[in-house]
Image (cartoon, rainbow, N blue to C red):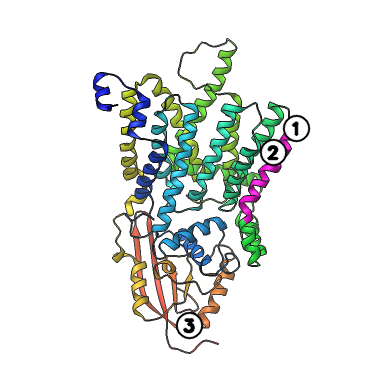
Amino acid sequence: MDTLKNIQKGKYDLESVYEELNFKPHIWCLVLAFIIMTICSRSSFLYAFNLWDDANSYFTVGKCIFRGFVPYRDLFDQKGIMLYFIYGLASLISPRTFIGVFLFEIVAAYLSLLAVFRISALFLKTDWMPYMVTALTGAVVYTSIDFYWGGSAEEFLFPWIMWGMYLSARYFRQEYPASMDYRKVLMGGVLAGFVLNIKFNSLGFFFAWMAAVFFADIIGERAVQKAFASCVVFLSGMGLATLPWIVYFGINGAIKDWIYVYIYKNVFEYSKKLTLSERLVKFYDIMKNHALNNKLVFALIFIAMVYFLAAAVIGILKKNGRAEIDIPLLDVRISELLNLGALLFFLVLVIFIGGVSLPYYPFPMNGFVVFGFTAFCYIIEKFANEVLSLILIAASMVAVVASCLLLSVNVKSMNLKKENLFLFKFRDYIVSSGVENPGIILEYTFDIGLYTVLDVNPICYYFQTQTLNMQEVLDYQKQYVHSGEADFVVSVEYEAEGLDDRYDLVMKDRCVFYNFDQTYYLYQRNDNPVTQ
């Protein structure tokens, strides 16, 4: 069928156009993911380098996995092993650049957007509107401040949150009050296991997910035994996702190191020690600050909350003959409303209840933006014909590109050139020094990227300065300075201390762009005798 002729004749077979243009969800989401990541992530080839210290530390640990190092035992960092493994695979593609990470970011975005598509399709009646919802949701999610520089743990756990959201939303929309079958419960557990092994503070989402299934079994079919059995199946799914890492650490004799660093230190040392009232005040302040920094995200989530609540309440009133409101509202049941509310509430609660927050922490909650756009598009599809819908979908792709270029703060650093960056100046100096496999100590800073651009391995456990037990870390690093094992020392913002006369300051450079301003110092070991 010729699409143009159909438009001219006023005949429009939407299903035929769908097949003819081949705009299948997978292709649409992959194209969106590529465009969005190319513009918004500093791992992209459009940027000189991803200077984010967290992403570089993940890269260093991940790369070292494939070089015989065991995370937590041989190198100290606090994120999950699955995140390091992803970065390790990325390093096999390109050990000196972030191109491999960029490709994995595209995959993560593609999976997330495909889940967005499926979620919106649960509520919308036409085949075309989910394309628009997916494009607009992707634009808002990845241009938000909490996307940050690109490559965060939150970004790589986001697909599993979104697919968990889809499974849960579909169950309560299409199957409840029937019980969720064990296969889907198991899949939910596997998704939770992925999140557990990337960054476990987002597990509040899956606590609510399983709690909803548990109470749905009891309330819906009064199947108490099934409810408890589902919990076991869910935990089994988490176990299956964790089993490869248990085997890995078991073979390497590092299970205790894994549990101590990843679980104990994050739970008992990273969170702030606050009273309940102080914790609640801190929680409020954190949420207020994130709302102010991510206004569009929070506005859309708020709109979704109000719309879905109104839809559920008015639906009940209509059913009981107490309301005759003729406005386009989704058919939303109370069970769906409670489920979505619980997912959001416990996700946010567990992330922030520790009293610690950084700009990228709220990123997992961005997925709830899909419900704000679903509400808008449900109203639009009530009034738009098929031709207008196609125009709107084409416009949504234009909006994605425009919003990425205009709203993503990362674009402001796109004009940085390698030759002007301290990192590549330091790299060139170290290479020209003739020191082979240089040993590097990073003082007063996380990983600045030298390990990456030089493609060298760390020489000690604390390969970067950590915020936990900082004096202990600095004292540990000084052993390698005093012994002369460190060929170079890098310090950020502060000049390195305790170097005696064994190291010379050879380079100093300042890096300034957007709201970033830091000074870097490079020291090189000289021929003076080792300090006793």
- Dividing the picture into quarters, in which one does residue 455 lie? bottom left
Cα–Cα gap, marks 2 and 3: 63 Å
Task: Determine if the magenta segment contains residue 233.
Answer: yes
Under mark 2, the amino acid is: Ser
Report the magenta stretch's main SS: helix
Q: Which mark is residue 230?
A: 2
Residue interval drawn in magenta: 225-243
Tell me, yes or no, if residue 123 can be seen here.
Answer: yes
> Which residue is found at the position 66% from the left and 67% from the top?
253
For disc 3, the neighbor class at 10 Å (few under 14, some 14 to 19, many from 20) is few
Question: Secondary structure beneath disc 1?
Answer: helix
Residue identified by numbered label 3: 500
Give the mark nearest the N terminus, 2 or 3.
2
Q: Position of residue 401 (x, y in %)?
A: 32, 42
Question: Secondary structure beneath disc 2?
Answer: helix
Q: Select label 2 or label 3 by which is in front.
A: 2
Q: Is residue 147 left or right of residue 478?
A: left
Tell me, yes or no, if residue 298 can be seen here.
Answer: no
Q: Nearer the viewer, residue 37 or 501?
A: 37
Which image quadrant: the N terminus?
A: top left
Give the mark nearest the N terminus, 1 or 2.
1
Under mark 1, the amino acid is: Val
Task: Determine if the magenta segment contains residue 273.
Answer: no
Residue identified by numbered label 1: 224
> Which residue is found at the position 33% from the left and 65% from the top?
421
Q: Is residue 236 left or right of residue 417?
A: right
